[in-house]
Image (spheres, helix red, strand yellow):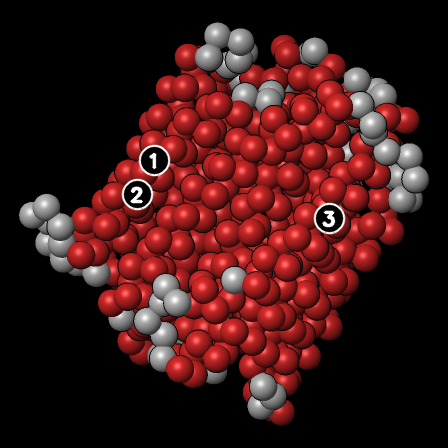
Amino acid sequence: MQIIREKSFYRELFALVLPIYLQQLLRISVDTVNSLMLGSIDQIQMSGISQANQVFFVYYTICCGLSVGVSVLVSQYWGKKDIDRIPAIIAHGLRMAAVVGMIYGCAVHFFPEVFMRIYSSDPAIIAIGAGHLKKVSLMYMVCGLSVVIFGASRGMAKMKIILFTNIISYSINILLDYLLIYGKLGFPAMGAAGVSYGTLAARYSEFIICTLFFLKASDIPFEPRHLTLVDRQIRKSLLNVTAPIVCHEVVWSLGTSSGSMITGQLGREVVGGYNVTTVLYDLGASYGNGLLNASSVVLGMTLGRGELDRAKKEANTMILLGLASGIVLGTITFLVRDLFLGFYALNEQSAHYARQFMTVISFIWPFSMLEMIGMIAILRSGGQGKVGFYTDIVVMFMICIPFASYLAFKVHAEPWIIVLTIKMIIVFEAIIGIINVYRYKWLRNLTAA
């Protein structure tokens, strides 16, 4: 297996990994801190917000799919040094995000209980989650616009815009949540409702800040007047790249959140244990997403320059880095289980379930990193996002989720067996993704006329 040996490659790659990792870590830290603060007060409030966040998670992954499509095209044109087409890519991406944000936000605002019943059968959890969804639905559109701007910035390797924005916005988020949850410095003690208002303020701050940074960067070829740009070829290319990615993200997010859907029907103790496990997994995933997005940008630029032989070596290198990272993350997850649980006021049964779920996750991590690098970073960089979509349709909705539901509601199997069955989705995706990487159908320049 040929790999890249030049130190400059690793410097370039990890120069992108670090800011993306920090940005992802900041995003995850908000959910982590909220989980810890609410979990120290009331397990029901923590579970209500955590289950409601699954609804936002589905929307956020749709936006990320659109963002990835924008980033893939921008990175290839940027690598090719053909920047005249980049404004049209960004303009089309922003318009798509605005439409999706308005539709999804309205649905969540007017029917929050309907969404919450998907993730819980507990009336108390549903009531808390529905109240949160109704409030934060007002920030869905601006969040989608911010994510697309971040995608365009990432495609041009302008990571400082993303990092600086998130340092400010997530700091605002955590501070407001702390003040409003506990009622500090004269603010009312609002509990779960405080999370809603803190999130709303932070997302609007994020949009304003990232827009200003993006427009003021002297070497970014985008101005407000470009918002009305229409380029049929670019729109077609963006749709061709983005449609399978967004479809994959929708299917994947529904499949991933199926763990919360199924465990949400199994009682408060299972819900509490699973939500805490998800927080720990997401902390590790912040690094995984950093490596994933950095790999996609670097590989996209290489493909845009038409250096296909080098792209093969880069893909091999990224796969090895992903596998090694997965082993490390799995080991850390296993070793810190009890320490992490010590931060939560869980009852004995919930802690028992969480410990079991964390053990399952620790063995899944190597496959999770291979799936991120193979199925997502490498295949999408060459416009092969449809592989993930078709894989998820079969693996998630025809095998793993039906079987997990059968185990949960017919057999009444142990919760850890149900979670393991759901997580087998990742194992299948990792294997199928790596197989398709070495078929090399992704090895193409998307900017070629």
| Quarter in which the C terminus is drawn | top right
Which residue is farthest left? 186
**Front-most of residues 257 and 160:** 160
Q: Are marks 2 and 1 in contact (CB under 8 Å)?
A: yes
Instruction: Determine whether, in the image, residue 129 is placed left or right of residue 412.
Output: left
Residue 211: image location, x then y, percent: 40, 23
Report the residue at 79% width, 18% height from top: 305
Q: Residue at x 83, y 27 (%)?
A: 5
**C-beta proximity under 8 Å, tags 3 and 1:** no
Look at the numbered disc 2 and give the secondary structure of its residue.
helix
Q: What residue is shown at x 46% (from left), y 12% (from top)?
A: 217
Local secondary structure at mark 3? helix
In the rendering, which numbered label is found on residue 169?
A: 1
Q: Quadrant of the N terminus?
A: top right
Q: Which badge, 3 or 1, comes first in the chain's sequence?
A: 1
Identity, as a three-letter code, of the amino acid under mark 2: Asn
Tell me if 154 is positioned left or right of 55 in this view: right
Foreground residue among 301 and 82 = 301
**Residue that label 3 marks:** 324
Question: Is residue 220 shown left or right of residue 393?
Answer: left
Distance of label 3 from label 1 (alpha carbons): 32 Å
> Which circle, 2 or 3, is nearer the viewer?
3
